[in-house]
């Protein structure tokens, strides 16, 4: 298996982009939503105040995103791509044959390729990602789909992600 620490692997660009988003949400984002809530509250009866309820819902979503980003960035493994040694691990673009179909995807966190790639992304915690994590090019591994059906997966290629 991989010697990868227990954090999501991120490129430096992805880490910087997410840190900037977090700064924006924690600063101006929180201020703006607080002002919108206060303005809506000043309109009167909160039970029937759609603007107030919408702003509160948006605040909840923003706070959830802030918590997700804080957790992700705190535990992230940032920097160099994994070695180009054919081992399937986070940060690798993996080509497989599954049920007679060829598929290529990035193993890692969806935030790595956000907006910069059309690659599908699977985490190492997903059923597919956990089945192939640590295997090598040429290996055939058993994959049990969420439906309970088992399939062989052939690892065709594994190379470091290059944004």
Image (cartoon, grey):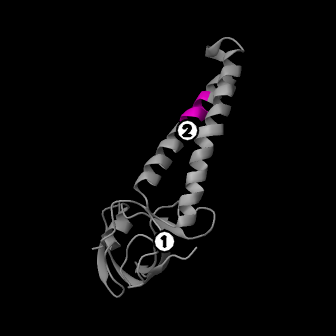
What residue appears at the point 38 percent right and 82 percent down from the top-left corner? 155
From the top left corner, tell me how far across and down residue 53 is, in percent: 62, 25
Residue pushed farthest top? Answer: 45
**From this viewpoint, is residue 113 visible?**
no
Secondary element at image label 2:
helix
From the top left corner, tell me how far across and down residue 18 is, in percent: 56, 54
Q: Which badge, 2 or 1, comes first in the chain's sequence?
A: 2
Q: Nearer the viewer, residue 3 or 154?
A: 3
From the top left corner, tell me how far across and down residue 52 is, in percent: 65, 23
In which quarter of the view is residue 26 placed?
A: top right
Residue named by callout 2? 61
Task: Report the span colored magenta.
Answer: 56-61
What residue appears at the point 58 percent right and 65 percent down from the top-left corner? 13
Whether residue 3 sits left or right of residue 99 in the image: it is left
In which quarter of the view is residue 6 placed?
A: bottom left
Q: Are marks 2 and 1 in contact (CB under 8 Å)?
A: no
Q: Residues within 10 Å of mark 2 (few under 14, many from 20)?
A: few
Q: CA distance from mark 2 to mark 1?
A: 27 Å
What residue appears at the point 61 percent right and 15 percent down from the top-left corner? 47
Q: Residues within 10 Å of mark 1 (few under 14, many from 20)?
A: many
Residue named by callout 1? 106
Secondary element at image label 1:
strand
């Amino acid at each position: 298996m991989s010697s990868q620490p227990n954090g999501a692997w991120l490129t430096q660009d992805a880490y910087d982009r997410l840190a900037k988003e977090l700064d924006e949400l924690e600063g101006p984002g929180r201020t703006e939503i607080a002002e919108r809530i206060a303005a809506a509250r000043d309109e009167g009866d909160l039970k029937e105040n759609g603007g107030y309820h919408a702003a509160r819902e948006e605040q909840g979503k923003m706070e959830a995103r802030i918590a997700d980003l804080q957790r992700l960035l705190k535990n992230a493994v940032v920097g160099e791509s994994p070695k180009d040694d054919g081992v399937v691990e986070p940060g690798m673009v993996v080509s497989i044959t599954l049920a007679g179909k060829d598929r290529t995807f990035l193993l890692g966190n969806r935030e790595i390729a956000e907006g910069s790639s059309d690659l599908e992304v699977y985490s190492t915690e997903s059923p597919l990602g956990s089945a192939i994590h640590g295997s090598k090019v040429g290996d055939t591994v058993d994959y049990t789909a969420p439906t309970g059906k088992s399939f062989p997966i052939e690892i065709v290629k594994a190379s470091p992600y290059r944004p």
